[in-house]
Amino acid sequence: MAATATAPTQADKTAIAGPGSPRKARSFKQRALTPYAMLAPGIVLFLVFMAAPIAYTLVLSFQQKKVSGLGLGKGAQSTVFAGFDNYIRSVTDPEFTASVLRVLTYGAILIPLMLGFALLFALLLDSRRTRAGNFSRTAIFLPYAVPAVISSLLWGFLYLPGVSPFHFVADRLGIALPSLLNPDLITFAIANIALWGGVGFNMIVMYTSLKAVPQEIYEAAKLDGASEIQTALRIKIPIIAPSVVMTALFSMIATLQVFAEPTTLRPLANSLSTSWSPLMLVYRDAFTRNDIYSAAATSIIIALATFAISFLFLRIVQKRAFGQEN
Amino acid sequence: MSTPTEIREKPSFLSTGILILGALYCLFPVIWVVAAASKSSDELFSTFTFAPSVHLWNNIVELTAYRDGVFWRWMLNTALYAGVGALLSTWVSALSGYVLAKYDFPGKNGVFKVLLMGVLVPGVILAIPQYLMLAQLGLTNTYWSVLLPQIISPYGIYLARIYAAASVPGDVIEAARTEGAKDMYIFNRIALPMMLPGLVTIFLFQFVAIWNNFMLPYIMLGDDTLFPLTVGLNGLLNQGATAPALYTLVLAGALLSIIPLVIMFLFLQRYWRVDLAAGAVKA
């Protein structure tokens, strides 16, 4: 985040002098407190709905329920400190490892395809030789307006053998198409839903940063005899590399949290377990099994993994993508 | 796209063709649902999947009759959660971003850094502890439980800081202050209008995020009259597994729920210029 975090401070150089300003209409004390009072709504909401839940999850993750005697009556159940028990149980739970593996496979299919197509579309939109750009841009961006539940529902029916146009075509051609909702293909099926929903947004992000590049650079490249593909590979892609990095980061975070798509597909696909993704597992532990302590530990593990991946990824790419800034 | 003075280069069929293929892929499920929502439940599994039929109105009437029009409740609820939630969120983000950009005070950078870390916190991880906390206050299964947690948006604050720094000149604030204007008056009457184009983008971001959110309301709500569309349609689909006649209602519902957002999108397209890396949304 280093590169983005420093961005605003430069613009802030115009910030007006606050409490130290010589022209103060009201008492110094009142003026000094003003910014804090104005930040209060944001800070309070942040503390209540972000900081406190994280702290609470941490506390829960180190606790467990202790049942004494038969577990009947008041005081028979108490909460005790559990150390790392919940964490050890989560990490060694084969269902958890299986869900992590599934999500990694899903991400490995989804992210390169989604960003690859987003980049291709953005470059094509930016090319002066492309026609019908407005139509294509709007159409490709449109799925972003469709909630994941609805898009899963639509694709779910499109996969369903009795309804699917893919099966219709395959039947006519005499090919026996396996159900796209069977256990072997379901990961691809879910990745396609996320691809459909995400490619347009990422395309817009990359296209916006392409538009910010001064046109003179391209003119110069053209005068030097660079072809359009050369310009794209040697000039455009390196210039928008920071955007690509950020879209990759946000896509990875989203991948780890996949929940709505598999949950919605479950009624249509028997092969989807209630622990298909790590977050579905957390949900099941917390609400179906009433084991909030395990759910809390698993949540913390997912959050830590998210941070670790974000951090590592930025460290790896920062030297390459942002290196030329210094 | 190209200005009249620019010389139009020779069109490329290949690049135009690839983009149109991409566009067709993205329109494919939308076109399909228009056809599918017009079929009776027998036709859904028998006629060619893209062949439209004449039962669209009938399906909408049946959907409206389902549990005394609960579908339209979901529609209104979604509009309420997304509309009110995004408005409040935009205002809080604008105020916080404005203060962070335009005031100097001890602890400013600390506050900003902590808020910025919030951008990376996986939002859905928060939903379960939020549920447990709101349950202790007796607020689960109310409108508040879905509305309140979605007002804070670290990314919105981050963007608002950039807009405020770029669009509100320091001398304007100083001039207003010399004339005796109070800080909140300056923010609401002077800074807010100047930041407006950027704020529309923050509003849209948050609106879409809340409209699309599934996990939070799924966890918080039990009463189906409080559901947003996402949770409602998910429930309807679940029931469809045992009563396939409901499938046509699900599809009609899916079609109806896409329409408002698609219309909003087409009208507000110019505000979607997102540059995540520069942290800026150029409006």
Image (tube, grey):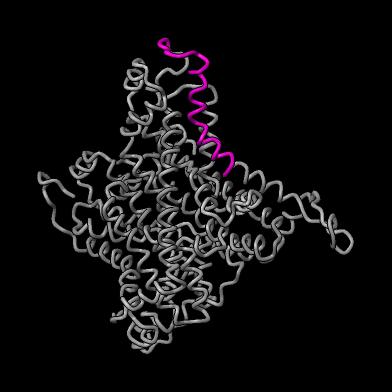
Q: Is residue B191 above or below residue A159?
A: above
Q: Residue furthest right?
A: A69
Give how far across and how far down residue A306 sits, in percent. Answer: 57, 50
Is B222 one of the magenta-colored residues?
no
Give how far across and how far down residue A256 sits, in percent. Answer: 54, 56
Looking at the image, how many numbered discs can be counted on the residues? Answer: 0
Please tell me which residue lies in front, B166 or A222: B166
Give how far across and how far down residue B23 sits, in percent. Answer: 29, 64
Residue beneath the point at 60% across and 71% down: A273
Please tell me which residue lies in front, B239 or A310: B239
Magenta segment range?
A: A22-50
Dominant secondary structure of the residues highlighted in magenta in the image? helix
Judge left or right: residue A293 versus residue A208.
right
Q: Is residue B27 above or below residue B85?
A: below
Residue beneath the point at 63% across and 52% down: B138
Q: Residue furthest top?
A: A22
- Confirm whether residue A234 shows in the render: no
Q: Quadrant of the C terminus of chain B?
A: top left
Judge left or right: residue B220 versus residue B36.
right
Residue beneath the point at 31% across and 55% down: B265
Please tell me which residue lies in front, A190 or B12: A190
- Confirm whether residue B128 shows in the render: yes
Is A28 one of the magenta-colored residues?
yes
Q: Is residue B241 above or below residue B212?
A: below
Residue beneath the point at 27% across and 48% down: B270
Give how far across and how far down residue B17 sits, in percent. Answer: 23, 65
